[in-house]
Image (cartoon, rainbow, N blue to C red):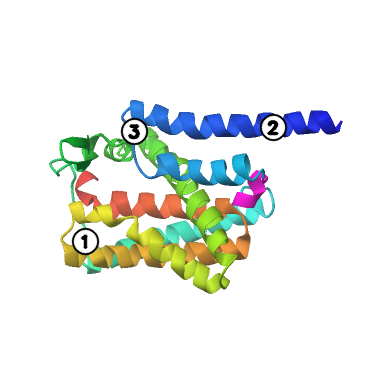
């Protein structure tokens, strides 16, 4: 029994490692990119493959699932609407990436260029005027972006930091790091408005951090993240597409 149990756990860790590496590579080959394609891989490889911890250690659990779904939907709608209004007040609406410059990384002659207009989330956004397109966009935002990023930020980073400092400090630190990773927004916005945008992102990150500590289920913040992001990207930041 112990031998079979060991083999099952070993096989599970091998499969997890394969999926965590294969999916991001497949997405890149297909021209799909974004922070969500690798954020889930890091905690899975470290927490499950390397340390042998269960997936529940990243917040993926059945505990309080109903409460997590309800709190995620309610907070997501509220954050999306409030965030959108804040964008309006700050004059950060009606943008388009159709003719914007690409994201470029590289040193010297070696450069990698990513077309923002070809990014999957943006493509789904441009097709979200139909009912089917809208459903696909929201599902993508919740399952791929929301869950993919929250497993990393709240389920992994915040919990790791909380092992060394207070929960409040961990929530704040994670929120700041979460905001800084969105600095790509300076490609679209001037510095002064970009800083305001990052403050909004950091504030949302702090709310999600607190929500995760209260509910202790990653689906609460994944749903909230996905819904709020979909709302303010579609109906506020990119209002020219509606």
Give the residue at the far right of this rendering: 1
Residue at left 67%, top 43%? 52
Mark 2, residues whose alpha carbon is within 10 Å: few (<14), some, or many (≥20)?
A: some
SS assignment at label 1: loop
Give the residue at the far left of this rendering: 99
Q: Which mark is residue 32?
A: 3
Front: mark 2 or 3: 2
Residue 183 image position (x, y, % from top left): 28, 56
Mark 3 or 1 closer to N-term?
3
Q: Which residue is mark 1?
A: 92
Mark 1 or 2 closer to N-term?
2
Q: Which residue is mark 2?
A: 10
Residue 70 image position (x, y, % from top left): 57, 55
Mark 2 or 3 closer to N-term?
2
Q: CA distance from mark 2 to mark 3?
A: 31 Å
Front: mark 1 or 2: 2
Q: Is 57 in the magenta? A: yes
Q: CA distance from mark 3 to mark 1?
A: 26 Å
Q: Main secondary structure of the magenta part?
A: helix
Q: Is 19 in the magenta? A: no
The residue segment tinted magenta is 53-58
Residue at left 21%, top 61%? 92
Residue 62 image position (x, y, % from top left): 68, 48
Residue at left 16%, top 40%? 108
Nearer to me, 3 or 79: 3
Q: Which mark is residue 47?
A: none
Front: mark 3 or 1: 3
Nearer to me, 133 or 92: 92
């Amino acid at each position: 029994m112990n031998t079979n149990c060991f083999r099952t756990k070993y096989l599970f860790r091998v499969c997890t490692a394969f999926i965590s590496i294969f999916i991001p590579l497949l997405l890149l080959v297909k021209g799909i990119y974004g922070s969500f394609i690798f954020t889930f891989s890091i905690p899975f490889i470290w927490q499950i493959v390397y340390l042998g911890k269960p997936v529940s250690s990243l917040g993926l659990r059945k505990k309080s699932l109903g409460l997590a779904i309800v709190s995620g939907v309610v907070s997501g709608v509220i954050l999306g609407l409030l965030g959108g209004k804040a964008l309006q007040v700050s004059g950060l609406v009606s943008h388009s990436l159709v003719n914007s410059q690409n994201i470029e990384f590289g040193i010297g002659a070696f450069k990698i260029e990513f077309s923002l207009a070809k990014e999957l989330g943006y493509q789904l956004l441009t097709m979200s005027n139909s009912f089917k397109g809208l459903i696909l966009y929201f599902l993508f935002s919740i399952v791929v972006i929301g869950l993919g990023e929250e497993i990393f930020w709240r389920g992994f980073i915040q919990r790791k930091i909380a092992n060394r400092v207070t929960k409040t400090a961990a929530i704040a630190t994670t929120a700041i790091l979460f905001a800084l990773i969105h600095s790509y927004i300076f490609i679209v916005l001037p510095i002064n408005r970009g800083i305001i945008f990052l403050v909004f992102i950091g504030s949302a990150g702090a709310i999600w951090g607190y929500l995760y500590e209260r509910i202790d289920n990653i689906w609460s913040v994944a749903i909230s993240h996905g819904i709020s992001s979909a709302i303010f990207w579609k109906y506020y930041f990119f209002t020219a597409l509606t």
